[in-house]
Image (cartoon, rainbow, N blue to C red):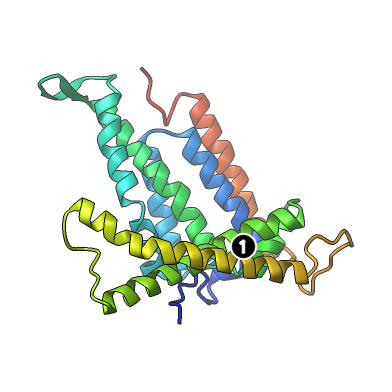
Amino acid sequence: MALQFELYTPGSSFLYRLDPRVKVLGVLVIFAISVIFTHPLFLGPFFFAILLIDILGGVPLGKVALLLKSLALLVIISLVMWPLLYHPGTEILRYGPIYVTDIGLAYGVGMAFRILNMVIAPISLMLTTTQRDFILALRGLGLPHKGAFALATTFRFVPTVVGVGQTIIEAQKSRGLDVNQGRITTRMRKYSAILGPLIISSLRLAQQLALAVESKGLGSTAKRTSIRRLQLTRMDYAVLGGYVVLLVLVILLRLRGVGAFHV
């Protein structure tokens, strides 16, 4: 039996009560802010603000940490490579031909926070929104039904594959295969015993999904209806107003040259 790793976790806090369209727009706002700013003193607070909102909203931090853990390597690469490649500012460290500047180091930290912001926001969305509500939100924002279904299914399919992969690993361990022992080349050869069954299982799941989608008439041109209709509340309107104020403030700061490095 495949181990299950569900993204959505039931709850009743204000995050769960927000209209899913508002939460999707919130993710887009975070994306925009992460692109506009490059300085860590501006990107960092947004990361911790989202983390605080998750804590207050009852989002399971264990799942958030587990999903962010997969970004550890990418964050480390950003922290290391940008200071080595980006050299404006004052030199603060040198080892032979390799040197690091203050702006280069700060820029690397800023890019790391950019990655974290652009990942923790959709993670928070998926942990507090059911697949059905996510599809309704995307359709409500103007995305065609096929596109909305495909995007929502992608988020749902990933944890399923993760569960299948964990099951395969446990099965191989029971047969005496430990993928964490040996040299890197040895480990890579061992992982072939996991990747093969994982690819086959993924193809089987994809085929079953295709049959299920076809049986439900996804390609039909008839007008679709929904049992549940989304309706904005006062809290939703207040949050949307906050988005507008925040975006205007961010854009004004950026136009004044604040939040980015000047070289």
Q: Is residue 170 visible?
A: yes
Q: Quadrant of residue 93?
A: top left
Q: Secondary structure at mark 1?
A: helix
Residue picked out by circle 1:
153
Can you give x and y, in whole percent of width and height, for residue 150 in the image?
Answer: 66, 57
Which residue is pictured at 55% across the width and 76% down the height? 12
Packing grade of label 1 (10 A; few <14, some 14-19, many >=20) is some
Can you give x and y, in whole percent of width and height, for residue 127 in the image?
Answer: 51, 67
Quadrant of the rendering where the N terminus is positioned:
bottom left
Q: Quadrant of residue 179?
A: bottom left
Can you give x and y, in whole percent of width and height, for residue 247 in the image?
Answer: 57, 40
Q: Nearer the viewer, residue 34 or 71?
A: 71
Q: Is residue 174 left or right of residue 248?
A: left
Task: Check the image and report above or below for 23 versus 178.
Answer: above
Q: Nearer the viewer, residue 3 or 179?
A: 179
Direction left: furthest residue:
96
Q: Nearer the viewer, residue 158 or 201?
A: 201
Task: Check the image and report above or below for 52 versus 251.
Answer: below
Quadrant of the rendering where the C terminus is positioned:
top left
Q: Is residue 19 visible?
A: no
Can you give x and y, in whole percent of width and height, for residue 45 in the image?
Answer: 38, 47
Which residue is pictured at 14% across the width and 19% down the height? 97
Direction bottom: furthest residue:
1
Which amino acid, by three-letter code, is at mark 1? Answer: Thr
Which residue is pictured at 52% across the width and 76% down the height? 11
